Image (cartoon, rainbow, N blue to C red):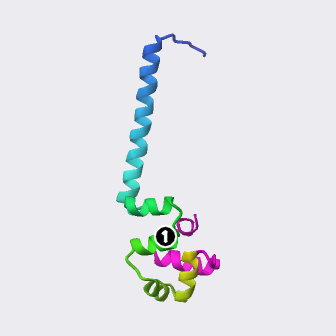
Amino acid sequence: MNEMVTIPREEYDRLRAAAEDLADLQAYDRAKAVLAAGEDELIPAEYANRLLNGESALRVYRHLRGLTQVALAEKAGVNRVTVAEIETGRKRGSVATLRALADTLELSLDDLTA
């Protein structure tokens, strides 16, 4: 059954704005639930800006976690020189190495390589 309802433009605009507000509130609630469940984390603006400015994700997350290159390398079971070379862009690192570093930093591989 096709029923049509005609409403004034102001009412349509008000309803549309209310629907957008509801969608925003639902997205906010989902984000808060993910954070509360420990499935995601907030990154301080200082670190987010470093990532946005193109700094090595490995270096930024290593600093965020409070680790030196030596400590990260030891925990991940990789060579410290490899960590330095990946951070400076001289090497990309193998998938296995990047996975070990990401796991140690409690990140997804995408977070480390994006």
Of the pair 76 and 45, the residue shown nearer to us: 45
Instruction: Indicate the quadrant where residue 100 lies.
Output: bottom right
Q: How crowded is mark 1: few (under 14 residues within 10 Å), some or many (20 or more)?
A: some
Return the x and y of residue 104 as percentages of the image width and height: 47, 79
Return the x and y of residue 78 as percentages of the image width and height: 54, 87
Return the x and y of residue 31 as percentages of the image width and height: 41, 51
Residue found at x 61% / y 80% = 96
Say whether residue 78 is visible.
no
Say whether residue 57 is visible.
yes
Circle 1 SS class: loop
Task: Tell which residue pokes out farthest to the left in this image.
Answer: 36
- 69 w.r.t. 51: above or below: below
Which residue in the structure is indicated by mark 1? 107
In magenta stretch: residue 104:
yes
Residue found at x 62% / y 78% = 90
Quick one: quadrant of the N terminus?
A: top right
Quick one: quadrant of the C terminus?
A: bottom right
- 79 w.r.t. 10: above or below: below
In magenta stretch: residue 68:
no
Indicate left or right for 53 with 66 as reference.
right
Residue found at x 54% / y 76% = 87
- Hey, what amino acid is under mark 1? Leu
- 6 w.r.t. 32: above or below: above
Residue found at x 47% / y 89% = 74
Return the x and y of residue 35 as percentages of the image width and height: 38, 58
Task: Say how many tags the image has.
Answer: 1
Span of residues in magenta: 89-114
Indicate left or right for 36 with 92 as reference.
left
Of the pair 90 and 71, the residue shown nearer to us: 90
